[in-house]
């Protein structure tokens, strides 16, 4: 199968819909249908069953889909290895990054990277730390930037630690939480982060917050707090210092921060040897070093 045919099979499998796959491949539906018929003729069997619900792989189709995905991945890896032998930094840099870091800290690093290495391409996915580890295991990313305690046996480098603050426009101290009727605004996050906050709350208060608002993104959580709707617990990485709110560190006592969040760079030794990964890591470490000096 040609590279184009491999991409066709992959797109049809992932989209499960002829129209969406055609749009993704910049083909017309009749042209895509004709290409699929040609591929099926080459294999001597139907690869997809067409129905009103879309495309469903046949047992033979599932085998060919697996072959196509593995062939595409192997081709990309080979290109990257060949590129790593050249003097220039190019090839695709595949990053899987915790959403909060991707929204706040990573853009300035990527800006410097693309200015230094214009021949390199970037593929970026964001999500929870568990999703990032999964992407590394499945070869969908070269490196991952994760938050909190992550079970990773291969290469793992500490980047920085940020503190967590109670943020509100009206509340001025942690003690006021005992009697306030203001809602606690929380954002959905990975289980370890959620459990850390729950444990902190239970150590300080006998009852759960009287009112809660749950949102799906940390930026939404931040904006609700900044607009005075309620209070939130936010990492310092999300705060610029210009916000017109009260910021209260979550303390054990007057000197020690109790709740913090560590950020790590993880990956396999083999991928760190790639030129584009090594070049990115150098830029990343310079920025991380600045944050560590401020800790």
Image (cartoon, rainbow, N blue to C red):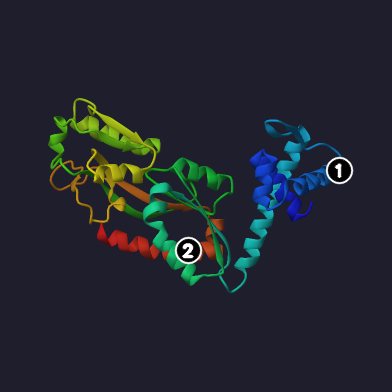
Mark number displayed over residue 73: none
Identity of the residue furthest to the top in this view: 207
In this rendering, is residue 11 above or below 80?
Answer: above
Image quarter where the C terminus lies is: bottom left
Marks 1, 2: nearer the viewer: 1
To which residue does mark 2 refer? 280
In this rendering, is residue 203 above or below 291?
Answer: above
Tell me whether circle 1 and circle 2 mark residues in contact (CB < 8 Å): no
State how far apart marks 1 and 2 are (Cα).
44 Å
62 relative to 119 in the view: left or right: right
Q: Which is more toward the observer, 288 or 154? A: 288
Residue 263 rendering spot, x and y as whole percentages = 37, 50
To which residue does mark 1 refer? 41
Which residue is found at the position 42% from the left and 48% from the top? 98
Residue 189 rendering spot, x and y as whole percentages = 38, 39
Q: Residues within 10 Å of mark 2 (few under 14, many from 20)?
A: many
Q: Residues within 10 Å of mark 1 (few under 14, many from 20)?
A: few
40 relative to 283 in the view: left or right: right
Residue 245 rendering spot, x and y as whole percentages = 19, 48
256 relative to 240 in the view: left or right: left
Image quarter of residue 110: bottom left
Q: Which is more toward the observer, 209 or 73? A: 209
- Tag count: 2
- Under circle 1, the secondary element is helix
Which residue is found at the position 77% from the left and 49% from the top? 31
Q: Which is more toward the observer, 53 or 215? A: 53
């Amino acid at each position: 199968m040609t590279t184009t045919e491999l991409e066709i099979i992959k797109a049809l499998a992932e989209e499960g819909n002829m129209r969406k796959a055609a749009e993704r491949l910049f083909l017309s539906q009749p042209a895509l249908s004709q290409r699929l018929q040609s591929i099926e003729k080459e294999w001597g069997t139907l690869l997809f069953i067409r129905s009103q619900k879309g495309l469903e792989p046949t047992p033979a189709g599932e085998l060919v889909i697996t072959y196509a995905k593995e062939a595409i991945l192997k081709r990309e890896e080979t290109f990257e290895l060949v590129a790593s032998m050249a003097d220039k930094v190019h090839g695709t840099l595949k990053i899987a990054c915790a959403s909060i870091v991707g929204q706040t800290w990573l853009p300035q690093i990527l800006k410097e990277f693309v200015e230094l290495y214009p021949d390199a391409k970037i593929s970026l996915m964001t999500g929870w730390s568990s999703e990032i580890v999964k992407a590394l295991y499945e070869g969908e990313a070269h490196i991952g930037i994760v938050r909190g305690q992550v079970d990773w046996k291969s290469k793992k480098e500490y980047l920085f630690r940020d503190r967590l603050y109670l943020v509100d426009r009206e509340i001025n101290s942690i003690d006021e939480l005992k009697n306030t009727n203001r809602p606690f605004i929380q954002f959905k996050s990975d289980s370890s982060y959620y459990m850390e906050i729950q444990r902190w709350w239970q150590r300080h208060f006998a009852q759960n917050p009287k009112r809660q608002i749950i949102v799906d993104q940390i930026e939404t959580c931040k904006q609700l707090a900044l607009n005075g709707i309620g209070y939130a617990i936010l990492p310092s990485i999300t705060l610029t210092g210009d916000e017109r709110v009260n910021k209260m560190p979550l303390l054990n006592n007057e000197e020690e921060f109790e709740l913090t969040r560590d950020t790590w760079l993880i990956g396999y030794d083999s991928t760190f040897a790639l030129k584009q990964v090594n070049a990115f890591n150098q830029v990343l470490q310079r920025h991380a070093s600045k944050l560590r000096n401020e800790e």
